[in-house]
Image: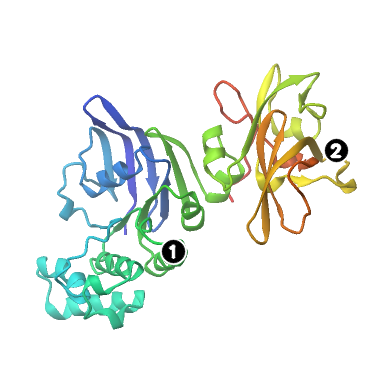
């Protein structure tokens, strides 16, 4: 088993930098998910670890060994691709065994590894089938099995679930997480899906434009985003943002205000500011009632534009303070388009950001969760 360390790693294609001064360490046996929008550099970062892309500058280590110039086959890694990459003319057993045969492992050792991996993945009954006879989920299990049999120091996953339907993605992400718990191997997983990142990773790394925006445990990143991009990217639906003026020591919310005392002044540094970006997550907005009239809650008034009911909950689209907001409410709440509503939110759940740098104004972050 081994850690993976990035020291001032850059990747450039001609004059275009796609990874910029990346510094990060994945601990031994840790499951780290790199997440971000298309073009952020996440797959390129993974491919540099695999040796499929060269490093423009910087150092990558697996354990104590610098791997910049090490051949991919000698890096002690195994990679699972988005498109499965199975040999169509080989059955499942041969697909899983082929890499070990190239390494000239003894036949009994190959058979032991293949049988063990098939049991872990629950594909023993598929060993004689060819890829065309398998479903997408079964093919992905075979691709994972081909990686397992190599017994590598590091597993690399490049968006392995994006070709599966929604139900299979949920099933497979749980299976990959259980696989990590069982194998206790270092895993590096790339995805654009923030739900995958939140549910699978011990830590998640958020990239934008090749730059690391934030890294931490899923709940730390969710509760304490360091900037507007992270706050909007992590969470579904994404956080609501309103840029508002600061008047008389309070954030003006069109007739209501959030004063800079008590909870707010304890959490945020707003001294000398004329405005800020106010953020609140959809799940933290509720219809106001009499029990929310104390100093622990803020409020705003808006007009309902659209109600989307998804079963147990409704996504209510509201115009407030001149901006479109989304509130995630119980579907038992009776609310219709065109209504005026007063929304309430716990002051300890708000997020405030600098309007120029877009960095969080939070004074402190609690210990990682």
Residue 295's disc is: 2
Q: Is residue 55 visible?
A: yes
Q: Look at 88% across and 41% down and name the residue there.
A: 294
Name the secondary structure under disc 2.
loop
Q: How many marks?
A: 2
Of 109 and 86, the residue lying toward us: 86
Residue 177's disc is: 1
Q: Is residue 279 visible?
A: no
Q: In this view, does 80 lie above or below 276?
A: below
Name the secondary structure under disc 1.
helix
Q: Where is residue 64 in the image (x, y as percent from the top left)?
A: 27, 48
Q: In this view, does 76 lie above or below 264?
A: below
Residue 21 figure quarter: top left
Q: In this view, does 40 lie to the left or right of 92?
A: right
Q: Look at 33% across and 66% down and name the residue there.
A: 136
Q: Is residue 226 left or right of residue 21?
A: right
Quadrant for the N terminus in the image: bottom left
Of 300 and 16, the residue lying toward us: 300
């Amino acid at each position: 088993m081994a850690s993976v360390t990035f020291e001032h790693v850059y990747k450039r294609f001609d004059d275009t930098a796609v990874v910029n001064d990346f510094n990060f360490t994945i601990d031994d046996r840790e499951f780290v998910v790199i997440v971000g929008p298309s073009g952020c550099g996440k797959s390129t970062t993974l491919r540099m670890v695999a040796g499929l892309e060269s490093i423009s500058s910087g150092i990558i280590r697996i354990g104590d060994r610098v791997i910049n110039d090490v051949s991919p086959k000698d890096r002690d890694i195994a990679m699972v691709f988005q498109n499965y990459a199975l040999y169509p003319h080989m059955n499942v057993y041969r697909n899983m065994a082929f890499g070990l045969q190239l390494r000239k492992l003894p036949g009994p050792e190959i058979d032991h590894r293949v049988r063990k991996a098939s049991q872990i993945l629950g594909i023993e009954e598929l060993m004689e089938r060819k890829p065309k006879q398998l479903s997408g989920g079964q093919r992905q299990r075979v691709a994972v099995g081909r990686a397992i049999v190599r017994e590598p120091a590091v597993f690399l996953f490049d968006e392995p679930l994006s070709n599966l339907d929604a139900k299979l993605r949920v099933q497979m992400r749980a299976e990959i997480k259980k696989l990590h718990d069982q194998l206790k191997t270092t895993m590096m997983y790339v995805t654009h899906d923030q739900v995958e990142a939140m549910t699978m990773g011990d830590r998640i790394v958020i990239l934008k434009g090749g730059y690391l925006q934030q890294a931490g445990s899923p709940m730390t990143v969710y509760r304490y985003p360091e900037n507007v991009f992270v706050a909007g990217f992590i969470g579904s639906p994404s956080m609501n943002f309103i840029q508002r003026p600061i008047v008389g020591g309070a954030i003006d919310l069109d007739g209501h205000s959030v004063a800079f005392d008590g909870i707010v002044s304890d959490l945020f540094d707003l001294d000398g500011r004329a405005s800020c970006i106010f953020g609140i997550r959809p799940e933290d907005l509720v219809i106001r009632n009499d029990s929310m009239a104390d100093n622990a809650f803020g409020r705003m008034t808006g007009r309902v534009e659209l109600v989307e009911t998804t079963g147990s909950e409704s996504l209510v689209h509201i115009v407030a303070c001149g901006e479109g907001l989304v509130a995630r409410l119980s579907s038992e709440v009776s609310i219709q388009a065109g209504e005026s509503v007063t929304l309430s939110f716990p002051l300890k759940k708000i997020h405030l950001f600098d309007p120029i740098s877009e960095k969080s104004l939070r004074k402190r972050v609690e210990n990682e969760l």
